[in-house]
């Protein structure tokens, strides 16, 4: 997610003087592992029309293409008064609301952060109700008579640690890649569970749709987002599994502010992502890192 954010930021800068300044969609393929070393983003405009600009971008490190991405840019400016708005939003009964059960002001930072978040400069407050849906005894478990259903869920309020930090458009792929993978949420009784093994979950493809611009009103936090993920399938080879992530605005920072009536109607989805990831032994990640001058 962080590496894809670098590509998105490079393309945003490339488009800064055009009429299409907002990323709307990006589809990325991760060809090789990225490293913490110098890299270049190569940007090529494939087609520029009245509504969209199509861009091809590649992240290159040490002369090797690591990620290739196809991006769609346009204009996400809010509709002007009097303009027709073809949107699905509150108060419509068909509109989706923020899928977290608690207001961020009523929760606190998790005492223990997942190992993979140690160096991410963020705080989490996981949604315990969503986590309970993954319990073997949960009513969400499926049977031979079930219609649909299945899989696991995860959600949390996520906040940038430093007070001067602010959400940016280029940071959305990073947040879209912040979740607990399906194998980590399955009980050890399941064959696809990561259990107590140290595993690595490399992304092989990722798409992000940018629904709206970063919030700028007093009704939203400038460094906190709501995250919701769901995973339904796991298959061979390499325990590949799907993940769908939604990134939402937050009405306040974690543990701050007040719960106001109708706060859910004021929140909106900033981005939606889908990815395919693998489940590999962590030793594979370590070996990949030792092949290059920079460690993972």
Image (cartoon, rainbow, N blue to C red):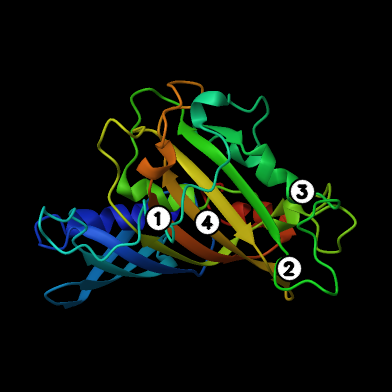
Residue beneath label 4, please? 245
Picture quadrant of residue 8: bottom left
Q: Residues within 10 Å of mark 4 (few under 14, many from 20)?
A: many
Tell whether label 1 touches label 3 (CB within 8 Å).
Answer: no
Nearest the camera: 89 or 174? Answer: 89
Question: In front of the other: label 4 or label 3?
Answer: 4
Give me the C-alpha separation between circle 4 and circle 3. Answer: 23 Å
Query: In terms of sequence position, does the residue under pointer 1 or pointer 4 come before the other?
Result: 4
Query: In terms of sequence position, does the residue under pointer 3 or pointer 1 come before the other?
Result: 3
Question: In front of the other: label 2 or label 1?
Answer: 1
Nearest the camera: 151 or 174? Answer: 151
Residue beneath label 2, please? 239
The secondary structure type at the circle numbered 4 is strand
Give me the C-alpha separation between circle 3 and circle 1. Answer: 30 Å
Residue beneath label 1, please? 271
Q: Position of residue 188 (x, y in %)?
A: 87, 53
**Residue 1 at least partly seen:** no
- The image's mark for residue 198 is 3
Picture quadrant of residue 3: bottom left
Question: In front of the other: label 3 or label 2?
Answer: 2
Picture quadrant of residue 160: top left
Q: Position of residue 107 (x, y in %)?
A: 58, 26
Query: In terms of sequence position, does the residue under pointer 4 or pointer 3 come before the other?
Result: 3
Taking the spot 44% from the left edge, 22% from the top edge, the residue there is 258
The secondary structure type at the circle numbered 2 is loop
Question: In front of the other: label 2 or label 4?
Answer: 4
Q: Up-down: is 59 above or below 99?
A: below
Give me the C-alpha separation between circle 1 and circle 4. Answer: 8 Å
Q: Position of residue 224 (x, y in %)?
A: 43, 35
Query: In terms of sequence position, does the residue under pointer 3 or pointer 2 come before the other?
Result: 3
The secondary structure type at the circle numbered 1 is strand
The secondary structure type at the circle numbered 3 is loop
């Amino acid at each position: 997610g962080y590496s894809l954010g670098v590509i998105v930021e490079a393309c945003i800068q490339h488009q800064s003087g055009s009429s299409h300044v907002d990323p709307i969609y990006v589809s990325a393929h991760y060809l090789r592992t990225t490293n913490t070393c110098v890299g270049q983003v190569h940007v090529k405009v494939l087609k520029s029309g009245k509504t969209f600009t199509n861009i091809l971008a590649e992240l290159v490190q040490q002369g090797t293409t690591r990620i290739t991405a196809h991006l769609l840019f346009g204009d996400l400016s809010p509709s002007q008064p009097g303009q027709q708005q073809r949107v699905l939003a509150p108060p419509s009964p068909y509109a989706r609301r923020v899928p977290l059960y608690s207001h961020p002001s009523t929760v606190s930072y998790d005492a223990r952060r997942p190992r993979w978040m140690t160096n991410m400069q963020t705080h989490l407050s996981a949604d315990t109700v969503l986590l309970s849906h993954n319990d073997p005894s949960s009513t969400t478990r499926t049977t031979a008579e079930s219609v649909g259903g299945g899989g696991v869920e995860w959600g949390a309020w996520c906040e940038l640690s430093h007070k001067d930090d602010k959400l940016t458009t280029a940071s959305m792929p990073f947040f879209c890649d912040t979740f607990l993978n399906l194998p980590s949420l399955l009980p050890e009784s399941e064959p696809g569970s990561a259990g107590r093994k140290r595993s690595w979950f490399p992304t092989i493809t990722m798409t992000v749709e940018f629904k709206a611009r970063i919030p700028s009103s007093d009704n939203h936090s400038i460094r906190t987002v709501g995250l919701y993920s769901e995973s339904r399938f796991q298959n061979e080879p390499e325990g590949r599994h799907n993940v769908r992530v939604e990134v939402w605005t937050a009405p306040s920072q974690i543990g701050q502010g007040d719960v106001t009536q109708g706060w859910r109607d004021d929140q909106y989805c900033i981005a939606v992502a889908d990815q395919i990831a693998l489940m590999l032994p962590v030793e594979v990640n370590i070996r990949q890192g030792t092949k290059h001058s920079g460690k993972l």
